[in-house]
């Protein structure tokens, strides 16, 4: 079992369609602009169009056991970093870290657990759906969930431009796409809660670089 010699940033989401891929792309662009060679492993099929890499298919193979996937992905990451020699690795975690409701179980977040068991991320970013109001206590509960279930600390929350609603007729989730930076004023006094626009991701990148620069030999 290998430890990676570079900083790992893990972008997770409350569920599908909460701007995870957008955040991943902007992070890579910002780190690259600061002069860091940055690799991205994403679950989004569009990654190839931006010349980034997708997560390996074996993560989705039902014939491979949970335990074996953890070991395989750990070895995959070690070889990936050795071959590509990035300064920073961004990993996009597919799906969601929690069940949304009775209609959306997010595959009982299997792959997020596999990824977090395979690698110890240095920075955790969690994308959330937009709501009319998110109480401060909710962020604390999400930090506890990720800490105890996935052994990762959420350093930054990104509020997406999507919200979801349960459709009892179709027994599915309907996603509503909102205007950019929808009602972010309610979060302006909360530390480490951001929108998903370029300005916010630039601010997150600057803060991450400062955090990691304080750790000897990490960046």
Image (spheres, rainbow, N blue to C red):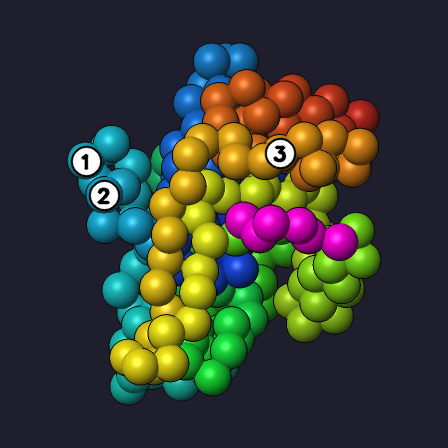
Q: In x, y percent, where is residue 196?
A: 51, 34
Real-space Cα distance between discs 2 and 3? 28 Å
Q: Which residue is mark 1?
A: 49
In the image, what residue occupies the spot 50% across and 43% down?
Answer: 160
Q: Which residues are magenta?
A: 130-135
Depth order, front residue of 76/16: 16
**As drawn, 147 above or below 106:** above
Q: Which residue is mark 3?
A: 184
Asked which secondary structure carries label 1, the reply is: helix
The chief SS type of the magenta part is loop
**As drawn, 14 above or below 125:** below
In the image, what residue occupies the spot 53% across and 60% down?
Answer: 14
Mark 2 or mark 3: which comes first in sequence? 2
Real-space Cα distance between discs 1 and 3? 31 Å
Which image quarter holds the C terminus?
Answer: top right
Determine whether, in the image, residue 108 is placed left or right of residue 151.
left
| Residue 46 numbered tag | 2
């Amino acid at each position: 079992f290998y430890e990676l010699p570079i900083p790992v940033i893990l972008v997770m989401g409350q569920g599908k369609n909460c701007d995870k891929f957008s955040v991943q792309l902007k992070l890579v662009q910002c780190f690259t602009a600061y002069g860091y060679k940055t690799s991205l492993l994403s679950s989004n099929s569009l990654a190839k169009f931006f010349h980034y890499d997708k997560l390996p298919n074996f993560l989705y193979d039902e014939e491979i056991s949970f335990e074996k996937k953890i070991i395989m992905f750990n070895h995959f990451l070690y070889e990936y970093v050795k071959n590509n020699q990035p300064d920073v690795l961004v990993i996009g975690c597919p799906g969601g870290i929690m069940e949304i409701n009775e209609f959306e179980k997010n595959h009982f977040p299997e792959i997020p657990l596999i990824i977090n068991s395979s690698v110890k991320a240095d920075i955790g970013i969690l994308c959330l759906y937009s709501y009319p109001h998110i109480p401060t206590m909710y962020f604390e509960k999400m930090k506890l969930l990720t800490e105890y279930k996935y052994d990762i600390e959420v350093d930054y929350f990104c509020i997406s431009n999507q919200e979801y609603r349960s459709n009892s007729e179709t027994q599915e989730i309907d996603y509503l796409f909102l205007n950019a930076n929808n009602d972010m004023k309610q979060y302006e006094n909360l530390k480490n809660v951001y929108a998903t626009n370029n300005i916010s991701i630039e601010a997150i990148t600057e803060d991450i670089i400062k955090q990691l620069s304080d750790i000897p030999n990490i960046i």
